[in-house]
Image: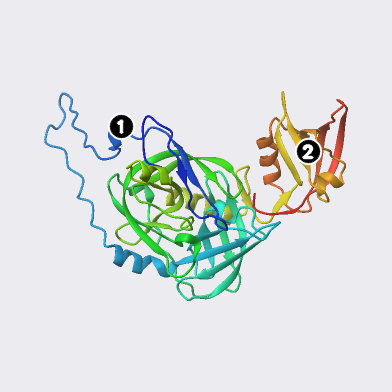
Amino acid sequence: MDDERHRVPEGRRVGGGGALALFMALLLAVAAFFGLRGELPDWSSSSGADNSPPALLEPLPPLDPAAVAHTVQPALVNISTSAWPFGVGAAGSGIVLTADGQVLTSHHVVKGAETVTVTDVGNGTVYDATVLGYDAGADIALLELTGATDLTIARIGRSAELRVHEEVLAIGNAGGVGGIPTSIRGNITDLNSTIVALNSSDLTRKALTGMVEIAAPVTAGQSGGALADPGGAVVGVITAASGESARDVGHTANGYAVPIDTAMRVVGQIRSGTPTETVHIGPTATLGVLISDARPSGARVDVALYGLPAYTAGLTDGDVITSIDGRDITSAQALRAAINVHKPDDTVQLGVLGVGGGQRTVTVVLALGTPN
């Protein structure tokens, strides 16, 4: 979605279509003043200050797309997932962080996945993968490839050093077709974009902040792929793209990436083994409910899925969950966050307000779910 100041642009997909996971940018916040964040020298002066001309920033280095792609491609993977109930999952990309198979990707690529299969671009080997952890809010996940050794590792740069107008290269599994990743060059147009991304595989929306925006038509399947600088260092994780409509009306389509500094902070949290309300670590636990915000407070059970923990424990459609282990639950998101720090087979105590107004406490043993 191009950076339009006075309209809500349409979105287009990245990382999916049909069997591809999609994130498309629906809405942008206003970009930096004149789009020049970090570019203008400080011309101000005060009495007694050095009034000599300020030092100008060094010229931005040129980008050689072929050389950068040659450097980065061997450290990328193509990702394919399957999901219940129809076996249709997502296709996307990933970035190899360790020789023994830790891979960085977008959360929405593996969201809802029951199986994850990864093909390493460097050696062509196909691996089964496990989701080590994820931060859905940051759209970042960390995978581990079973039996991987001696993989080519990506060189990780620093997104804090990026500048508006700098040329970068977006590299990933365009179209979700596998094979050699496709790359496309573009200039950075914003370092702090805010978007609302639509995952077309399940129609959920997610607000993403602090995105690096690039003037490049990123395409389906490149989600989880690398945004690389002229030196071949990975400076972002591709996550979303703007819509076909942008090109239809003559505007440049844009892509969006999670800054690598943000992504690696999530990776560090996952590696620490300490979950938070935003960062989930290990297998995902589930109550087996579809929920929404209750009024005035709580998480309303819209559907208790047959055979899963809430249903087995006697929760029914219309019940409102008001607490978990004595902690108040004020919204559906609060319940998701509380479950996020648990693991499958954990036992929790739910405070429940029934449809008829009666209060009760329900003991529930959480089951194994998919990355949510």
Q: Position of residue 143 (x, y in %)?
A: 57, 61
Coloration of the structure image: rainbow
Front-most of residues 173 and 43: 173
Q: Name the residue located 29 percent from the left edge and 44 percent from the top edge.
A: 164
Amino acid type, callout 1: Phe
What is the distance, in whole Å, between disc 1 and disc 2 at their CAs?
A: 47 Å
Secondary structure of the residue carrying numbered label 1: helix
Neighbours of disc 2 within 10 Å: few (<14), some (14-19), many (20+): few
Give the camera-side residue of 28 and 297. Answer: 28
Q: Position of residue 220 (x, y in %)?
A: 47, 55
Which corner quadrant holds the N terminus? top left
**Residue 347 image point, x, y percent:** 81, 47
In the displayed structure, 97 sits above or below 337; it is below
* Mark sitting earlier along the chain (1/2): 1
Q: Which residue is mark 2?
A: 325
Residue under label 1: 33
Left or right: 87 as drawn, with respect to 191: right
Q: Crowdedness of circle 1 by 10 Å Cα count: few (<14), some, many (20+)?
A: few
Q: Amino acid at mark 2?
A: Asp
For residue 328, say whether it is visible: no
Quarter location, residue 3: top left
How many numbered tags mark residues here?
A: 2
